[in-house]
Image: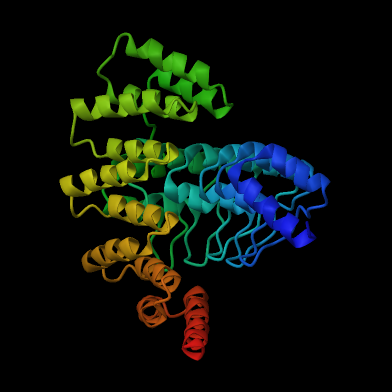
Amino acid sequence: MENRALNTELIYASERGDVAEIDRLLNDGASVNFQDADGRTALMAATQKNQISSVELLLVAGSDVNARDITQLTPFICSGANGFHEILSLMLGFGADLKSVNRFGGTALLPSSEKGYLKTVEKCLDAGIPVNHANDLGWTALLESVILGNGGRLYSDIVQDLVNAGADVNLADRNGKSSLQHAKEMKQQRVVKILNGEFIVKSENIKKAKSYARIDKLDEALAEIDKALENESQNLELIYYRGYFLQELKRYEEALEEYNRALTMDPRDLDFYFYTANCLRLMKKSEEALNEYDKAIELDPNETFYRYHKSNYLRELGRHEEAVIEMDKLLSQQPHRYDFSFHKANSLRSLGKHHEAIAAIENAITNDPTNSLYHLHKEQSLKLLATQTTNK
């Protein structure tokens, strides 16, 4: 087999998680850092599919955690953006560039803060990724966790961790608004208290459980919550943490039972629809996960949070037509959210609809004319449009 064929097979085997085949191909001369037409290495392919054993083998074989694909994504940043904290932890020991950024100018900490990946946020902070770094939208991890979060149990813990790590609550976005101002406008009462330096009361069991979880002692964390539930079986806060720790232990069915139990007790606690959706995503049950977002949207159709995260997930699934529909709904409610226009443009570009992508990015430029990221993406779309026109 020719080297190029070996290299391509290595990428496919890594994506599948076929460790024996990876080992064979490497022994036969496959290049561990070969990049395909999309710039993907075998390590990137394994990371995207959360194939931990494949990642371990490739790292030992010398795979580059900082190699960039054509979208400027590295395996290290990819692990953070997808909440794959086990992979991210492995890469830290193999030369991960903590200050490296994606095409939006964000470190691994920013997308994990945005998407609600608490454990990944903690790993990033413990590794020393700069907590106050701002991306090309002018957002820090703290701003992202507030603006794109919902101030609920999970996001409050993320905000608390960021603040504890030294996040500057006074840093403002490009419109001059601080995290505290955003939290107040969005009525995120828990987050407002944290940003004001007020003490958030949690039971001793929850505090102990969180301390155990921070050092990866999840069984001990779960035991603390179970102890508390013996006396407070209907406590939604305890039920949430039980579900969360079960999810981190990969006991997904049990975690779902806890989240659904909470929804039976209070069907309007929309937080739990987000938790069920996340759990179903980890179980690779995409339609059921999308269904959970829809349930929350139906209960509160003006709620930006669930529609935004649904559109994010649709983009991850490569379902860009549907993602554009969700973005249009968001823009109809908030026409001046230039970040929504930017995401819409990216989906349109993925669909080859470059005229529409350019129109969407121009809306972002109108709202934020000094942002070089938007101008760069418009230039790229114009080039793709010219190529498309030439090839017709």
Counting every numbered tag in the picture gives: 0
Name the residue at 44% across, 15% down.
224
Is residue 93 something one can see in this rendering?
no
Q: Position of residue 85 (x, y in %)?
A: 57, 39
Name the residue at 44% across, 55% down.
316
Residue 364 located left or right of residue 163: left
Is residue 274 something one can see in this rendering?
yes
Quadrant placement of the N terminus: bottom right
Q: Position of residue 333 (x, y in %)?
A: 22, 64
Q: What is the quadrant of residue 273 in the picture?
A: top left
Name the residue at 42% across, 54% down.
317
Which residue reaches farthest bottom? 390
Residue 318 located left or right of residue 236: right
Residue 378 to residue 289: above or below: below
Residue 72 located left or right of residue 94: left
Q: Position of residue 277 (x, y in %)?
A: 34, 40
Residue 287 located left or right of residue 197: left
Residue 85 to residue 308: above or below: above
Q: What is the quadrant of residue 330 in the picture?
A: bottom left
Q: What is the quadrant of residue 225 in the picture?
A: top left
